[in-house]
Amino acid sequence: MTTPIDTAATAAAKGADPIVMEIVEGSLASIEMEVETAIGRTARSPMIRDAHDYRAGIHDRRLRKLTGRSYSALVHPVARDFPIETMRPGDVFFHNDVYLSEGGIGHLPDLCVTVPVFHDGEVVAFVQAFGHHDDIGGCVPGSMPSAARSVYEEGLMVPPIKLWDQGRRNEAALRIMTRNSRMPDSLAADLDAECSACLMGAERLAELFRRYGRESVEACFDAIIDKTTETYRREILPKIPDGTYVWEDYAEHDGVDEPRLHTQRITLTKTAEKIVLDFNGTSPQAKGPINHCGDYADGNFLKKWLAPILRNLADTPERMAELDVNEGVVPLIEMRFPPPGTLLTPVFPAPTNARTFVILRLLGVLAGVLAKAVDGRMPADQETIRYTGVYGEDANGESYLMREVLGGGSGGRYYADGEDTIHVVPDSRNLPSEFTESRFPFLVERLGLAVDSGGAGEYRGGLGYEKHIRMLRDASFMSIADRSILACWGVRGGKAGRPFQVTIDPGGPDEREVDALADDEPVRAGEVIRIRTTGGGGWGDPLDRETAAVLRDIRWGKVSPRGARDDYGVVVLDTPDGPRVDEEATRELRALARAGRTGREAFFDRGPGYARLADARAHADVDWL
C-alpha cells in the first residue's frame, strides 16, 4: 500500500505554511459549495433548482482549477478575449459558444458565468459557474434538436461578453438572450442566481486574501495543485504497468443517419512519468449532434473530465473517495488528437447538443483500456445521463416544458455491486414527483428500479430507473439518449446491462416503442410513457455469485426469479416462508451452464445489440486480452 503524500512537506516545498494551506484548501471547498448552494436555492428552472444540473469552480490567476469536488468549465476563453489587466471589480463575464469556449462548454444550453476576484486592485482568482438551462432558442423546445445538422439549429451562440460591467448589468445582452428563449422568465432568474452566487463567492475568496495576504494564499494554491500531482504520481500511475493498450467503444446513432457504430478509440501508453491518451482511430465527425469539441487548450478540460476514472486504481475505495481532481492532474496526462473532422475534433459549425454520447463514452473507453492493463481491476460500464421530457400546453393554454436528467446503474466492481440509479453530475437528482405533478399536466404512476436491468456478474451492475408518466393532456415527448441498442458492457466474465427503452401505452392497443433520439413524439391524454434507463455492466462470472446475494436481490425486488435462473443459474423456490434457494438444483444448473461454454471468452461483453450493428459479430477485435 502506498503512503499518502505528506501535506506539510508539500506546503514547505512551495513556501506555504502547512496550517494555512489546510485552512485555504478547506475554504476553497467551502466557498465552492456555498456558491452551488446559493444557486440551487435561488434559481427558478426545474433543471437548475431541482435537478441540480450545474457546477461551480474556483480558478487562480493562472487559470488553474483549484477545487476538486467536481468538474467545471474553463476561464481560458474569458482571459483570451478580455485581458486580465482590463478587468474591473463588479465585472461578470458570460459565454456559451461551444467553439469559442476552449473546450469548456459542450453544448449551447450550458451557460457559463465567470467573476474575477480582486485584491489590492489586481485579479488574483476567478469564481465560475455553469449550468444546463431550459431553453436558449433553436428549432425545438429545450434547444437540443436530435436531428440537428449545424449549431445554428441548436440555439443562440454567445461568445465571451461582459454581462455586468463594473456592477452595471448589460440589459441589452440580457434582453437578446431572453427574447431568444421559450422560457424567458426562467432564463433570466437562473442567470441572476448564478451571477449573484459567483459575486458572493468572489467576495468570500477576497476575504481569504485580505486575511492571509496574497503571497501566502498563492503559495498555498501552488502547494494544493502540487499535492494532487504528487498523489497521482505516487499512488495511481504505478498501478498501470508500462506498455501500450488499446480499446474502443461506440455511440450507436447520431439522429441523422441510420444506427451504426461511431467509434471512439483510446490507445493508452504508460511511461514512468505520465500516461499518453491517443484518440486516433476515432470516427469522422457525425452529421448529427453527437460531436464534442475536445481538442482545445491542449485538451485541458478533457484531461480533468477523464481523470476521475483513474481514482478507481487507488488502494481502497475509501482512499479513492479522498482523491480530488484539480489542475494537478493535467501534467500527468498527454493527449494526442486526430486531425480536425472527427467526433472529438469537429469542425464548425458541426452540431454538438448531444455531445454526451462522446464524452460519457470516453469515460467508459478509458475505464475499459485500463481494465485491460490491470486485469479487470476497474468497474464495468455505466451510462448515467440522458434527457427525457414532455412539452405542450397546460389547461390555461400556457406553454410548458418538463425535462429531466434520469440516471442509471453504475458498473459492478471487483469488490462490490454497482450502485443503482446514479447520476454522473455530482449532487444532481431526478425531479420530485410531487413537484412535477403540481406543475405539469401528468401523473407519475411509478418511479422505481428497473428489475433485472443490472448486468449479471459475480458483482452485479447497478439498476436503472423505471418511470411511468400518465399524460392528462395531449403532449409531445422528447428524448436525447444513447445505449438503446448498445448496452453497458460487462468485464472479466460479467454480462452487459439492459439498454435504455421508452414505450408509450405499454400493454395498450397503441403500444409503441420510441426512438432514443426523439424531438416530438405525440402522446395522447390518458396514455402512459414508460421509461427504463440503463443498467450497469456486471463484473466477474455470474455463476460465481453467492446464492445468498441472488436471493437477497430477489427479496429486494432487484432480480426476478426468472432472472436468477437465466442469468445466475440459481433455482429459487416459492415457499410459504418466502423465496429460498434450491441448492442442489442450483449446483446442477450451474455445472450444466459451465459445461456448455465453448472456447475462450472475450474479456468484455457488449450485449446482443452489438451484433446488430457489427455485421453479426459478437465482439470487437479489441475485446480480447
Image: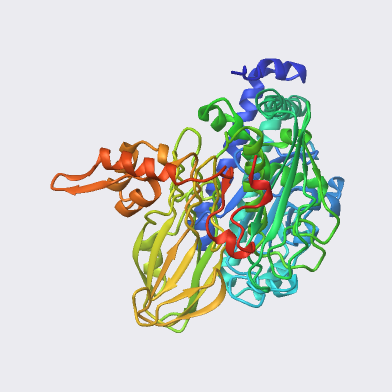
- Whether 252 is drawn above or below 423: the answer is below
- Whether 432 is drawn above or below 326: the answer is below
Whether residue 248 appears in this view of the structure is no
Whether residue 448 appears in this view of the structure is yes
| 187, 544: nearer the viewer | 544
Q: Quadrant of residue 159?
A: bottom right
Q: Quadrant of residue 433?
A: bottom left
Q: Is residue 533 left or right of residue 254?
A: left
- Quadrant placement of the N terminus: top right
Residue 614 drawn at (x, y percent): 64, 61
- Whether 478 is drawn above or below 96: the answer is below
- Whether 62 is drawn above or below 535: the answer is above
Residue visible at 61% across and 69% down in the picture: 135
Residue 537 drawn at (x, y percent): 51, 48
Residue visible at 66% across and 37% down in the picture: 205
Residue visible at 66% across and 27% down in the picture: 239
